[in-house]
């Protein structure tokens, strides 16, 4: 392999997950990959950060007793070589919608990298709601790995990260034909439900339930609409979540 591209690969499902192995193998064909991932499942931990984590050598690289964000910092600052790109995944289950950006461990690893000044790609595999949860095989990540490999080989050199700090990629399961790729924006459709049962409360993500019923309200151009149409969704994003300053708040501050 003739490449100078250095990738730090992490995830939130754990270093022994099939999606991680699939992505490691795919990216190792086009780049120098240093694997630094959680020792156990860290799904939905967001950007939780530890002050100290254990580290062990693993056949793929290093296993960290911590979160995805821990892995990124440990890799960039202590364990890995100089890194050109952080890739996080491949997650088992899609990470769709604006609301997951602060919740998903997979996406949060990419956000952590972006705040550290390193471009990143988060990669997730959409599993239909009526098939969830279930065990997955490495082969089922083929479409996600194809998209990730394509972007890794081209996005940095073509200047994509001069306009975006990280990409959130969601891919479908392999089909009869290769999936097309579309650029999307995170959907803002979000609906949760809660049902009390005596001394417990069950929380339900109603957006996922709508996906299983095929009744999503997401408009064209959104990530959830693209994945429901069997396409690879690529959302270009920035790490600081900000809004514009406005005169109403300026007035309140002045009156304080």
Image: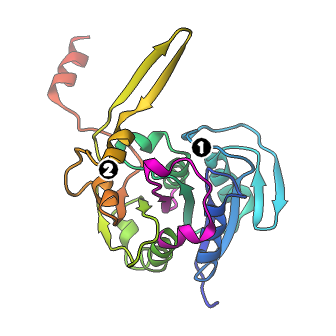
Scheme of colours in the image: rainbow
> For the view shown, which residue lies furthest in the right direction?
56
Q: Position of residue 112 (x, y in %)?
A: 54, 49
Residue at (67, 67) in percent of width and height: 21
Q: Name the residue under label 2.
A: 186
From the viewer's perspective, is residue 38 above or below residue 249? below
**Quadrant into which the C terminus falls:** top left
Residue at (36, 46) in percent of width and height: 212
Query: Taking the image as drawn, is residue 37 in sight?
Result: yes
Q: Which mark is residue 43?
A: 1
Q: What stretch is highlighted in magenta?
A: 117-143
Mark 1 Cα shell of 10 Å, populated few (<14), some (14-19), many (≥20): some
Query: Would residue 49 be counted in the magenta stretch?
Result: no
User: Which secondary structure lies at badge 1?
Assistant: loop
Q: Where is residue 2 in the image (x, y as percent from the top left)?
A: 62, 91
Q: Nearer the viewer, residue 226 or 237?
A: 226
């Amino acid at each position: 392999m003739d490449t100078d591209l250095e990738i730090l690969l992490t995830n939130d499902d754990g270093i022994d997950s099939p999606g991680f192995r699939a992505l490691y193998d795919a990216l190792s064909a086009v780049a120098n990959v240093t694997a630094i991932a959680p020792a156990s499942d860290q799904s939905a931990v967001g950007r939780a950060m530890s002050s100290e984590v254990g580290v062990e050598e693993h056949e793929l690289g290093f296993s960290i007793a911590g979160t995805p964000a821990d892995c990124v910092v440990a890799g960039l600052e202590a364990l890995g070589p100089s890194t050109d790109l952080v890739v996080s995944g491949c997650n088992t289950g899609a990470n769709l919608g604006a609301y997951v950006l602060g919740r998903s461990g997979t996406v949060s690893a990419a956000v952590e990298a972006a705040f550290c000044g390193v471009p990143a790609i988060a990669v997730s595999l959409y599993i239909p709601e009526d098939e969830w949860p279930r065990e997955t095989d490495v082969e089922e990540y083929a479409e996600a790995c194809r998209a990730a490999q394509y972007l890794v080989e081209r996005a940095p050199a073509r200047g994509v990260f001069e306009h975006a700090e990280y990409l959130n990629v969601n891919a479908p399961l392999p089909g009869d034909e290769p999936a097309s790729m579309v650029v999307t924006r995170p959907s803002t459709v979000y609906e949760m439900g809660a049902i009390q049962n005596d001394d417990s409360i069950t929380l339900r993500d109603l957006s996922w339930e709508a996906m299983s019923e095929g009744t999503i309200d997401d408009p064209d151009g959104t990530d959830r609409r693209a994945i429901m149409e069997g396409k690879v969704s690529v959302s270009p994003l920035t790490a600081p979540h900000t809004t514009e300053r406005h005169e109403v708040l300026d007035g309140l501050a002045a009156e304080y």
